[in-house]
């Protein structure tokens, strides 16, 4: 008996707080930002751009928000045929990502290699597109005005945590007919019984199709 209705976004709710404090804030029409060229430390890792750059952030804080790794590797394999793919993650993800890039051409893991958050943002700002979970990397790329596609599991963008100023159709959802209890958590820290594999209803071929469509559009 859920009512699917967009709640006020977290960005708007934060803006409301500052408005009550007397600050004039309008986030309805963001100004374009100036792209910063790659720092030398970053370009030493990335090399030159000779085809579109796709960022992929395959991890999230909770299992219910994380796309199955075997399916994500299918997506990475498909993307690597036409694009340069950068894999983002924490230091704890380095071994997994190194294993993935060993099996696919045109893939580069930047986990633990960029030398800090500033350099990571610098690379993200120069991507053509980011594919991410409902996680921090999605918000970093959206704030850099990079087209950002997000994959949703036990949560839902209507709860207010969709990336800033991104089209609603950039949020790819599971099959809600097959899993009518979704969303079962606001933050993704809970998993519905019977919905452990909800994200498997988001097919790799549909993710690839969406990424390519957004790249062509932009």
Image: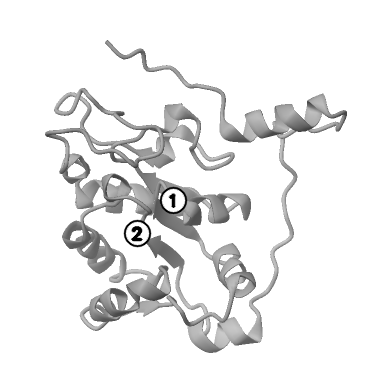
How many residues crowd mark 2 within 10 Å: few (<14), some (14–19), many (20+)? Answer: many
**Mark 2: secondary structure:** loop
Q: Whole-percent x and y of residue 159?
A: 45, 28
Q: Nearer the viewer, residue 171 or 114?
A: 114
**Mark 1: secondary structure:** loop
Q: From what the image shows, is residue 169 above or below residue 217?
A: above
Q: Residue at x 34, y 32 (%)?
A: 185
> Which residue is disc 1 drawn over?
135
The mark found on residue 68 in the picture is none
**Relative to 109, is 200 on the left or the right?**
left
Q: Residue at x 48, y 50 (%)?
A: 148
Q: From what the image shows, is residue 47 above or below residue 192?
A: below
Q: In this figure, which colouring scheme has been used for the structure?
A: one colour
Q: Residue at x 54, y 50 (%)?
A: 139
Q: Separation of disc 1 and disc 2 at Cα?
A: 8 Å
Can you tell which quarter of the image residue 215 is in?
Answer: bottom left
Q: Whole-percent x and y of residue 123?
A: 56, 71
As drawn, the residue found furthest toward the bottom would be 44
Circles 1 and 2, Cβ within 8 Å, touching? The answer is yes
Marked residue nearer the N-terminal end (1 or 2):
2
The mark found on residue 59 in the picture is 2
Q: Residue at x 34, y 59 (%)?
A: 59
Q: From what the image shows, is residue 131 above or below residue 177?
A: below
How many residues crowd mark 1 within 10 Å: few (<14), some (14–19), many (20+)? Answer: many
**Relative to 104, is 210 on the left or the right?**
right
**Relative to 25, is 145 on the left or the right?**
left
């Amino acid at each position: 008996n859920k009512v699917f209705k967009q709640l006020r976004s977290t960005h708007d709710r934060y803006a409301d707080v500052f408005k009550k404090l007397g600050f004039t804030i309008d986030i309805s029409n963001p100004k374009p930002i100036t792209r910063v060229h790659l720092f030398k430390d970053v370009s030493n890792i990335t090399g030159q751009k000779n085809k579109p750059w796709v960022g992929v952030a395959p991890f999230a804080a909770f299992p219910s928000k994380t796309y199955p790794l075997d399916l994500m590797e299918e997506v990475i394999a498909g993307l690597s045929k036409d694009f340069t793919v950068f894999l983002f993650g924490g230091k704890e993800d380095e071994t997994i990502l190194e294993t993935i890039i060993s099996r696919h051409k045109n893939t580069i893991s930047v986990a633990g290699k960029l030398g800090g958050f500033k350099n990571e943002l610098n690379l993200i700002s120069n991507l053509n597109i980011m594919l991410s979970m409902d996680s921090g990397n999605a918000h970093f790329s959206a704030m850099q005005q990079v087209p950002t596609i997000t994959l949703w599991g036990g949560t839902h963008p209507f709860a207010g945590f969709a990336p800033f100023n991104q089209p609603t159709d950039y949020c790819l959802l599971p099959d809600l007919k097959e899993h009518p209890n979704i969303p079962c958590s606001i933050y993704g820290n809970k998993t519905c019984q019977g919905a452990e594999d909800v994200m498997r209803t988001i097919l790799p071929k549909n993710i690839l199709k969406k990424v390519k469509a957004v790249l062509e559009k932009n």
